[in-house]
Image (cartoon, helix red, strand yellow):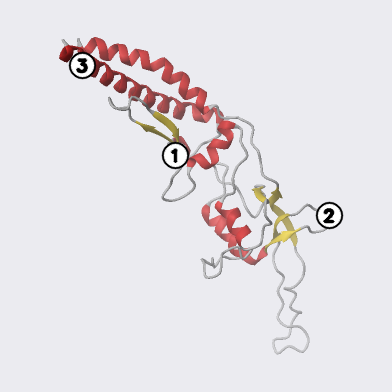
Amino acid sequence: MAKYVAALRGNLDANIGKAMTGAAFDARDYLKQQTPTYISNPTKWTLNSTFVSRATPNNPAVMLGFKDYASKGTPAAKYLQPIAAGQPRSHKGFERQLQDTGVLRPGEYAVPTDVYPLRLNAYGNLTGPTYVRVLSGLKGFREGGYTANTKGASSFFVGEPGYLNRGIYARVGALPKGTGGIGSPKGGRPITSNLKRGFHTVFNITRQPKYKQSFPARRLMIDKFNEKFPVIFERLVFKSK
């Protein structure tokens, strides 16, 4: 009798674990399906940002969450958690590098403006090469670190020009060039490459941004899990009989 009860309990625990795991994967897939409703034009990285840990008979529990690791790029949890929970966002690697080199002050954040010569891509983000270009122009790499040989990199600067707020600016407009002017062996018009140019605000420098909860990922996953678990569990129990 004891062996029979133990067998039933083991079978029940196994079915519970399988049902929990199946419901968790359904919840993950449902979140992926619903993400474009809350995030405009999400990247594949964002759509595949959720992980699932499987339940076992010895550990009848599952975990669903945003991936907080990445071999390359920014972990999804870093930028999704603030909008999913309504939290302040942490510093990006770009901002930490600018702080480490003294370009940004402690507590400052840089928010892109999508203004020429920098443009957000189709997903609403700046690309890695664009960040490298700005870092190089601001001398934001640590000593001995990577240096980008990019055209116009020296046109970026941080400051409060005129009556504008503190920000990261990019000089725009062609640099006028001459051939030396009167007395120059080449003759011609004077060299005028030191003339001032216009500039655009490419990053606003702000205090720590805090996001409103705009992506109810937790509620979406829990609701779908609660919907699917009893259905899957019932199917497994009747199938095993």
Mark sitting earlier along the chain (3/2): 3
At label 2, which amino acid type do we have?
A: Tyr
Q: Is residue 134 visible?
A: no
User: Mark 1 — residue?
Assistant: 67
Q: In front: mark 2 or mark 1? A: 1
Tell me residue 169's x, y (percent): 70, 57
> SS for tag 1?
loop
> Is 42 rendered above or below residue 236?
below
- Residue placed under numbered mark 2 in the picture: 163
59 sits to left or right of 128: left
Distance CA(mark 3)–CA(mark 2): 78 Å
Q: Check disc 1 and give the amino acid type.
A: Lys
Helix, strand or loop at mark 3: helix
Say if residue 30 shows up in the picture: yes
Residue at 41% across / 50% down in the picture?
A: 71
- Residue at the outermost front position: 2
Q: Position of residue 29 (x, y in %)?
A: 40, 27
Q: Residues within 10 Å of mark 3 (few under 14, many from 20)?
A: few
Q: Quarter of the image containing the N terminus?
A: top left
**Residue, far right:** 163
Classify mark 2: residues with Cα within 10 Å, few (<14), some (14-19) or many (20+). Answer: few
Residue at image mark 3: 6
Earlier-in-chain disc, 1 versus 3 = 3
Rendered location of residue 191, percent (x, y)? 74, 78
